[in-house]
Amino acid sequence: MTLRLIFRTVLATALSLLSLPALAGPGSGKTSGPYVGAEIGPVNHHFVVEEGVPPAQPTARNVSQWGVGGGVFAGYDHYVTDRIRIGGEVAFNFGGRTPATTSAAGQPLSITPRFGYSLTARAGYALSNAVIAYGGAGYGGHRYRRNLPAGTADFGDWNQSFILLGGVELKASSRANLRLEFMHLDGTRNQVMLGIPIRF
């Protein structure tokens, strides 16, 4: 599956989620409890190259690459009212392409993504019995194989920082939902994932 097809699929899913009517039945989209799931979508890895010869001010250049990534996740959520949901989730992420460039001195620069994790708290609001909009924040990291001169990016093999996220979730059946989520790991990773949480 090409990256363009992934983008089109994610966009089509987002439009479908926003246009679907509510499912019939009181509370049909309001299931609390544990869940597990998997996700796939476009992921962006990036890093900053700072170049310049003192006393000149260094110039910063962002090196970025989109690719296809995925992940698995597990969490728990609970409805505190008919419309408000809170919870937490842990996830393991993988995939994406290597952002690479060449320095002004001709040196190759790259970070190859290996795997990442996230620990997030979430809060959602039920727009209907079928659709929930949510957001959240937390902490996470991604491990890289670096090919960088000293001082180019000093996060070491790990970039670990805060996470921001937002998404929309659709009730698909009594046990499975469909969600579209954007997640930002500050420093090196952005992703848009189409996921299927399964509740038990």
Image (cartoon, rainbow, N blue to C red):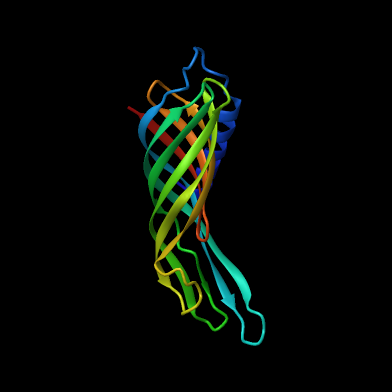
Residue 8 sits in quarter: top right
In screen coordinates, is 60 left or right of 98? right
- Determine the residue positioned at 43% across, 53% down: 140
Front residue of this view, candidates 10 and 50: 50
Identify the residue at the far front of this view.
80
Is residue 189 visible to the viewer in this orientation of the structure? Answer: yes
- Is residue 63 shown above or below 181? below
Q: How many marks?
A: 0
| Between 8 and 162, the one nearer to me in the picture | 162
Q: Please tell me whether residue 12 is drawn above or below residue 119 in the rendered image.
A: above
Residue farthest along the right direction in this orientation:
56
Of the pair 81 and 108, the residue shown nearer to us: 81
**View extreme (top): residue:** 25
- For the question of whether residue 5 can be seen, the reply is no
Residue at the image position 40 percent from the left and 53 percent from the top = 95
Image height of 51 relative to 178, above or below: below
Q: Position of residue 45 (x, y in %)?
A: 49, 59
Quadrant where the C terminus sits is: top left
Name the spot of residue 62 as percent of width and height, x first.
58, 66
Point 42% across, 58% down: residue: 142
* Position in image of residue 160 (x %, y %): 44, 60
Percent position of residue 5, x then y? 51, 44
